[in-house]
Amino acid sequence: MGFIKGHKLMAVSIDPRSGRTVFSFDLGATLEVRRMKAADRECLWELREPTGYVLSIRGDGTYDNGPASGTDRRPGVRGHVIDVTHVQ
């Protein structure tokens, strides 16, 4: 992944059916992440948020967003369908 080191992330596009994600960077680089099998529920990628939460995008078009620590009592979201209709 050295080819994107130092590049600024400009856009992220997620296919809500498969979780396929395309990350676009300022100097023209793109990174595509996709599932290996059609019914794959495995995590495709994770984003660790400064709040302590982890956003996980899955290969079946769902996501989880919850605390990284099992001791954190804040509510989490599990298995919600990705909805990109309101994303600009």
Image (cartoon, helix red, strand yellow):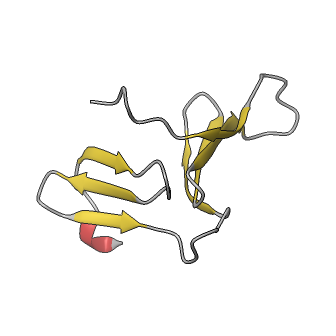
Going by the image, does 85 lie left or right of 34? left
Q: Position of residue 34 (x, y in %)?
A: 46, 68
Residue 69 sits in quarter: top right
Q: Say which of 3 and 23 sits in front.
A: 23
* Outermost residue toward the right in this view: 71
Residue placed at 31% from the left, 55% from the top?
A: 23
Query: Which residue reaches farthest top?
Result: 74
Instruction: Tell me if 39 is positioned left or right of 9 in this view.
Output: right
Taking depth in this image into account, of 5 and 86 the one nearest to the observer is 86
* Residue 64 to residue 1: above or below: above
Q: Could you say where residue 74 lies in the image, as x and y percent from the top left?
A: 78, 22
User: In which image quadrant can residue 2 be found?
Assistant: bottom left
As drawn, which residue projects farthest toward the bottom?
Answer: 36
Q: Report whether 77 appears left or right of 38.
A: right
Q: Quadrant of the C terminus?
A: top left
Q: Position of residue 39 (x, y in %)?
A: 64, 68
Number of numbered discs on residues: 0
Image quadrant where one finds the N terminus:
bottom left
Relative height, residue 87 to residue 59 (above, below)? above
Q: Where residue 42 sits: x, y (%)?
A: 67, 64
Residue visible at 73% across and 41% down?
A: 68
Q: Is residue 39 above or below residue 8?
A: below
Instruction: Please tell me which residue lies in front, 59 or 55.
Output: 59
Residue occupying the point 59% across, 40% down: 81
